[in-house]
Amino acid sequence: MAYPPIMPGNNGKISTDDALEFLGIVRETFQGQLAKYQEFLDIMKDFASKRIDTHEVVLKVETLFCGHPDLLFGFNIFVPDGHEITADSSSDSFEEQLAHYMKNINLK
């Protein structure tokens, strides 16, 4: 399932509403897999409490969202420059994933 891209709120800055919208998309995507949704929440809690750093968040989220390029690309708006998730190493190339993502968001 593909979702429209989450674009940062006012003036290109990410807002709480952007984060809540993305969280809702993650919840909907994993609605039949509560453990995966809970794992995402746990990753975010660990980051907020500084138990893990940005690099570790990206690695964990990349693994968790494997097979969901829409979530991977959507998550990138929350990631600092230089830490973006660029491809799902287990499937298509970055260019193929991006083309698929862009095609799906244009259908909405």
Image (spheres, rainbow, N blue to C red):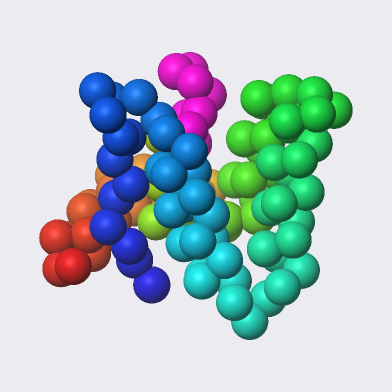
| Residue 18 visible in the picture | yes
Q: Position of residue 16 (x, y in %)?
A: 48, 38
**Is 5 left or right of 71, judged from the image as shown?**
left
| Residue lying at the far right of the rendered structure | 51
| Residue 96 visible in the picture | no
**At 34% across and 53% down in the image, what residue appears?**
97
For residue 28: magenta?
A: no
Question: Where's the C terminus, which quadrant?
Answer: bottom left
> Eyeballing the image, is 10 above or below 19?
above
In the figure, residue 3 lies in which quadrant? bottom left
**At 76% across and 40% down in the image, what residue appears?**
45
**At 49% across and 43% down in the image, what residue appears?**
19
Q: Position of residue 27 (x, y in %)?
A: 57, 66
Q: Main secondary structure of the magenta part?
A: loop
**Is 64 left or right of 5, judged from the image as shown?**
right
Question: Where's the N terminus, which quadrant?
Answer: bottom left
Q: Position of residue 63 (x, y in %)?
A: 65, 50
Q: Count numbered badges in the picture.
A: 0
**Is 93 left or right of 57, judged from the image as shown?**
left
What segment is highlighted magenta in the picture? 78-85
For residue 82: magenta?
A: yes
